[in-house]
Image (cartoon, grey):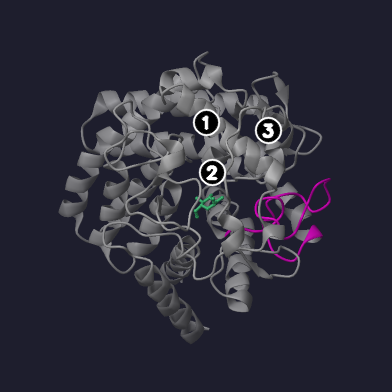
Amino acid sequence: MPEQADDLMARAVEIMTENDRGSYTVPTKGLYPYQWNWDSCLTALGQAHFDEARAWTEIETLMAHQWPCGMVPHIIFHEKSDSYFPGPDTWQTGRPVPTTGITQPAVAGFAMARLLSRAKDRSAALRRARALLFKVSAWHDWFYRTRDPQGTGLVAIIHPWESGRDNSIDWDAALARVPTEGLEPFTRQDILHANPDHRPTQAQYDRYIWLVQHFRGLGWDTSRLHDASPFRVVDPGFNAILIRACDELADLAMELGETELAARNRAYAERGRAALESLWDDKLEQYLCFDRAIGAAVDSPSIGGILAVFAGLPDHRVDALARRVGLLARRCGFLVPSHDPAAKGFESLRYWRGPVWLVVNYMIADGFAKAGHRQVAKHIDDDSLRLIAESGFAEYYDPITAEPCGGGRFTWTAAMVLEILNGQKAAA
Ligand code: GLC
């Protein structure tokens, strides 16, 4: 087994190096030729195992493109490329280096805390953490200011792409309410790089682009977009990541003597954690999304409601989620499917409507391990590694057959393999 682990780690480093563009890493060649927000933060965790300094650079490059309002965009278009739609000409956000105008899960605070806690060069890490601290905190402030204007403790996403789970069944009903009148004609590129049967449908794409056009029409004034968006959904997984990042940032700020910033982030986390309770569903024994535009829960058993464990939850909720994961394990070959295989709408090969994604597995396993559920965490990690052994470093996998899907030689998948294997090594 150790030789196999060494071989997997060597292959992971090779993929990450191949996708490294110097100061940022592309998710994979062709399909995703730019820098993606949460990809980069999770990528940095993997990079730290073989090049600590480079890992900090990955997050610094991302944060260098933060907007003055505090938002950190979901894609930075560092270089021109014809292989991706919608590119800078569609977004038209007017930034010096073009970016999109929406955000993605706020992994940065968690990632930098983890880099610091493991740093071999601690003084360099402290210096770099201090410089990032204020930027990441400004992003958290932005979230609670603009995406939770009523002060509920939970933030909403205003575009499915913000969730990172682009075409989840969670968004179907809310997205169906988004109009398509006035949509400018466009040509998709994703279906030239990946199997169209695995990608979002055209009806979904039309609405994704309509929302972009709508926000563009409002001049990308992020203080107006939440209320002006017909799509406003509260995702427990997205909030859990933000809550965890606020907590980690609060610890880090205390360490650096920034007590005010620490107190603010701690308050966000505590309020958010308390508010998550409103998303619990007794029938399904997991959290559910909430459609803020119509004020109703979204009856859809997706992985977003399990990822909530990453926030740090009361014991009885973690126990219930562990039972839920046990049930899912009996319904598929590989944990954790992005949608319950027994539920309506599940598709084993279509992107976020069923397949397994290693990054989400990683955060769920981390949440369970932190809460003392080591067996569940190990089950998930083992399944992640079995997927790699059977099917290589793909973008995502069929949870029943392990078929590799989407882009190949995928950066964040490789990063997660380095995280899991090095974690196991350290624990042995
Ligand atoms: C897809 C995923 C998203 C990811 C991006 C780049 O859009 O849904 O989560 O950030 O690809 O890998």
Nearest to the eye among marks 2 and 1: give it. 1
3 or 2: tag closer to the N-terminus: 3
Q: State whether residue 269 is above or below residue 112.
A: above
Q: Residue at x 48, y 62 (%)?
A: 416
Residues at circles 2 and 1 in contact by the CB criterion of under 8 Å: no
Indicate which disc residue 175 carries. Answer: 3
Of helix, strand and loop, which one carries label 2? helix
Residue 157 can be seen, yes or no: no
Nearest to the eye among marks 3 and 2: give it. 3
* Callout 1 amino acid: Gln
In magenta stretch: residue 350: yes
* Callout 3 amino acid: Leu
Quadrant of residue 58 within the rendered picture:
bottom left
2 or 1: tag closer to the N-terminus: 1
Q: State whether residue 44 is above or below residue 387.
A: above
Disc 1 target residue: 213
| Region in magenta | 331-357
Image x and y of residue 408, in percent = 54, 69
* Callout 2 amino acid: Phe
Q: How crowded is mark 1: few (under 14 residues within 10 Å), some or many (20 or more)?
A: some
Q: Which residue is drawn at 30% across and 42% down?
A: 63
In magenta stretch: residue 384: no
Of helix, strand and loop, which one carries label 3? helix
